[in-house]
């Protein structure tokens, strides 16, 4: 699919500097631009590439001032990164699949919306309700009485267990599992464990993105809730009865233990671990590989294991690298003190 530069500028309300009739057929990185490629410049450290890129056109900010001749057509916009994302979404929508595969297994009472795509070997169980413009790629499983809103995409191999509810405009990436049993077992006197039935579900609100191989467990009772706008990266575990507030973002391999409530607009780096039955406030930022074992107030910035105030943690880490030298110096001082004591004892004897 091909577009002219002026057509692209019209979509994002940009201003063209150069050839408005230039043809664009692909997206490309600015450092590896290609003919008919569209790229963007949003990070100053990549600025030098714009003077040598082979991309046909580049999105730049309105305040970009070239210091020499630029070989490509420019499209000026307030936020090049956001505009590029919008264009990629626009392109994806233009190329999306529609239709139901003859190899899909769909229960007779399932309700399927308009303009859907259902790929090969998809299994849709009884009582399922699927909205309009939903895309379900091959090898997905949709359990009994699941509800999926409009414009949601399930990539290959997504599994959604019974009774779960998925909102509008959500994306589940390959291998994501929604609504598997929570990890609930009651210890018995003989050291065996009795499984606790997980009778709740998972509710995922609108505009949520769930990464590849991420698992969100169903609740024991009630619902595990992922509020609107949440973005979860790959390989994340959200345990039963958890609640994640709107627009919170988590990088890969975070683990959230059961019954923990996380506020809105939080940012978690990769491999953050959160203990169970905790309350994390709004606007909290947590550095990668931190471990949270206590309740956290609003607006906190944490780092470390166990996690504490990020500035104090950085100071501690700065001191930590000097510990070997400190230990050596302390040993020397101890030796000197012992020697001084001996000299004092000799003086007293005299």
Image (cartoon, rainbow, N blue to C red):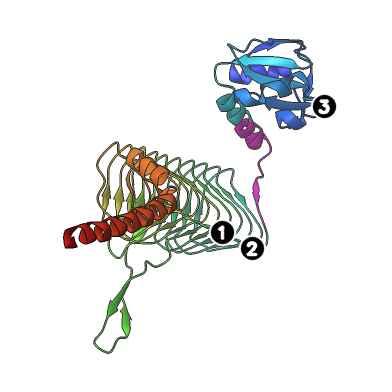
Q: Single out the mark in the foreground, 2 or 3.
A: 3
**Magenta segment boundaries in residue numbering:** 88-101
Q: Is residue 54 left or right of residue 270?
A: right
Residue 195's place in the image compared with 13, above or below, is below
Q: Is residue 145 above or below residue 282?
A: below
Determine which quarter of the picture holds residue 21.
top right
Q: Which residue is nearer to you in this view: 180 or 168?
A: 180
- Give residue 151's position: percent from left, percent from top: 52, 41
Q: Is residue 45 above or below residue 98?
A: above
Q: Is residue 233 above or below residue 16?
A: below
Instruction: List x then y, in percent, for residue 329.
Output: 39, 51
- Residue 120 belongs to magenta span: no
Q: Which residue is mark 3?
A: 35
Q: Quadrant of residue 259?
A: bottom left
Q: Which residue is mark 1?
A: 175
How many residues crowd mark 2 within 10 Å: few (<14), some (14–19), many (20+)? some
* In front: label 1 or label 3: 3
């Amino acid at each position: 699919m091909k577009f002219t530069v002026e057509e692209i500028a019209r979509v994002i309300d940009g201003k063209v500097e150069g050839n408005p009739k230039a043809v664009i057929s692909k997206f490309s990185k600015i450092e590896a631009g290609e003919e008919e490629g569209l790229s963007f410049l949003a990070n100053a450290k990549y600025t030098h590439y714009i003077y040598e890129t082979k991309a046909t056109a580049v999105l730049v900010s309105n305040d970009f001032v070239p210091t020499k001749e630029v070989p490509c057509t420019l499209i000026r916009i307030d936020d090049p990164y956001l505009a590029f994302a919008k264009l990629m979404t626009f392109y994806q929508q233009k190329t999306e699949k529609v239709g139901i595969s003859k190899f899909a297994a769909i229960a007779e009472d399932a309700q399927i919306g308009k303009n859907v795509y259902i790929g090969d070997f998809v299994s849709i169980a009884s009582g399922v309700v699927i909205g309009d413009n939903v895309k379900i790629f091959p090898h997905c499983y949709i359990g009994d009485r699941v509800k999926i809103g409009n414009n949601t995409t399930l990539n290959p191999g997504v599994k959604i267990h019974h009774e779960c509810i998925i909102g509008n405009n959500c994306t589940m990436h390959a291998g994501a599992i929604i609504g598997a049993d929570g990890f609930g077992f009651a210890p018995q006197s003989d050291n065996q464990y009795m499984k606790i039935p997980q009778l709740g579900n998972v509710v995922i609100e609108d505009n949520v993105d769930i990464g590849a191989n991420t698992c969100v467990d169903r609740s024991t009772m009630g619902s595990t809730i992922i509020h609107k706008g949440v973005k979860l990266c790959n390989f994340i575990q959200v345990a039963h009865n958890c609640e994640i507030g709107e627009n919170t973002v988590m990088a890969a391999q975070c683990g959230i233990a059961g019954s923990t409530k996380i506020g809105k607009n939080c940012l978690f780096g990769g491999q953050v671990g959160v203990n169970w039955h905790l309350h994390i406030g709004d606007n909290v930022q947590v550095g990668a590989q931190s471990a949270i074992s206590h309740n956290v107030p609003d607006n906190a910035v944490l780092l470390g294991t166990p996690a504490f105030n990020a500035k104090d943690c950085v100071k501690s880490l700065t001191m930590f690298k000097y510990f070997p030298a400190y230990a050596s110096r302390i040993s020397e001082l101890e030796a000197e003190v012992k020697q001084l004591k001996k000299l004092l004892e000799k003086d007293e004897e005299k």
